[in-house]
Amino acid sequence: MAEQSTPETSSPGAPAEGAPSEEGVSKKATARKSPPKGAISEKAPPRGAVSPEASSKGVISRRRLLGTAGATGLALGAAGGAAGYAAAPSADRTALLSSLGADEVMFHGKHQPGITTALQARGHLVAFDLSAGAGRKEAAALLRRWSTTARRLMAGEASASADTDVARDSGPSSLTVTFGFGHSFFARTGLEKQRPIALDPLPDFSSDHLDKARSNGDLWVQIGANDALVAFHALRAIQQDAGQAAKVRWQMNGFNRSPGATSQPMTARNLMGQIDGTRNPKPSESDFDRRIFVPDAGDPSWMAGGSYAVVRRIRMLLDDWEKLSVKAQEDVIGRRKATGAPLSGGTETTEMDLEKTDADGGLVVPINAHSRITRPDENGGAAMLRRPFSFHDGIDADGVPDAGLLFVCWQADPLRGFVPVQRKLDRGDALSTYIRHESSGLFAVPGGAAEGEYVGQKLLEG
């Protein structure tokens, strides 16, 4: 899980490393003369923000308010929210809290959003099955509705119908919505001849403990945003749009480090405390598109500009992992826990020396270290763009956390990307003792929709 890195969340005002040109992020304040409903602008800043200037003109500051609370004791508590609202300054005397909500990812483009977009703080993965009697016609209408909703919400606008107002006060917050088709979708819609060979079911792996009810599905939707309410709002809108055409098969919630949580952009950490990847393919690399996206002349033609997503719910056995010493954890991964540097020396980005030995003649990077096994040069050049979310779904009856990684990886062909690497991991990865693959899915994610089109239109109307 750790060798190939993930697009990191970016700090406000700082571009993400390897930011793509196809899925560009723009600022609402400059992209529009007047922001849409709910977007943050300088003319209409969020209620409750207090600028230094406003404070100096007599508006109650947080320090003074807390001092008053100490003096009045229970009296202020009895006043409840009323006192808080009374102390809030008027909108014309406040300043912007942050530009985070103004970040917007474009819906239309050669590729769908949410693939090379920087990691977002909140994510939802959800799979749907078409309802009994629903076929190609109903699927086309559904993808048309979903695309319209995604375009509007990603622009910070309300959904076209029955908006819940959950995100009324927020801007786009880097929202992305990505759509894919599962193997079963093509039989359900009479499009078996258009099903890609690359979508053939993944092979069985000896380490799998898969729950079929939480695996696969006719349709798959990935939602990401830097605000939890914005992400939930999109999830709810997508579910409502499904109507009678499709029903939820499974749904999973994830998170990452929030933009601005670190003083500078950094590679993500997972719930094991490890820097989760350094060797992710970057859009700036000359062979990036060849590895990650289906070429324009690819087969089938409707997948041009698309990609294949492998989705795995990987539970981390944290109680067992945390019993290990830091040295033992580093030997499992093959990298320093604090810095992500290879055990052979250097910094996070230093090339790993696989042949380096210690004073006793043993390999410095153990032969079964996760980072050694997953290297592209150890797997015939196999590469995939990893873009996961962490998850925590509570504590079970034994007090063990149900937590881990919602693994999502992208590649032009899973038989050349995910499969060879996972087969090798299956044969002797030191990390396999501390993780468990609990669900799995493979989805064909078509290219992006052009202006006036919906995602999947070339398949469903071709």
Image: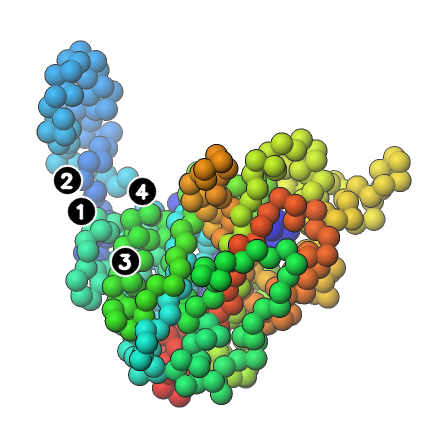
Residue at the limit of the structure toward the front, as seen here: 397
| Foreground pick, 428 / 234 | 428
Vertical order, 13 against 21 (above or below): above
Residue type beneath disc 1: Ala
Left or right, 161 with respect to 328, comes to left
Circle 2 packing at 10 Å, graded few (<14), some (14-19), many (20+), is some
Residue in the image at 82% along x and 43% along y: 363
Tell me which numbered mark, 1 or 2, is placed earlier along the sequence: 1
Residue at label 4?
A: 98
Q: Position of residue 119 (x, y in %)?
A: 46, 52
**Distance of label 4 from label 2 (alpha carbons):** 15 Å
Question: Is disc 4 in contact with disc 2, using a CB cutoff of under 8 Å?
Answer: no
Q: Is mark 3 on a helix, strand or loop?
A: helix
**Distance of label 1 from label 3 (alpha carbons):** 27 Å
Look at discs 3 and 4 and give the one toward the viewer: 3
Residue type beneath disc 2: Ala
Residue at label 3?
A: 236
Residue type beneath disc 4: Ser
Residue at label 2?
A: 91
**Distance of label 3 from label 4 (alpha carbons):** 26 Å
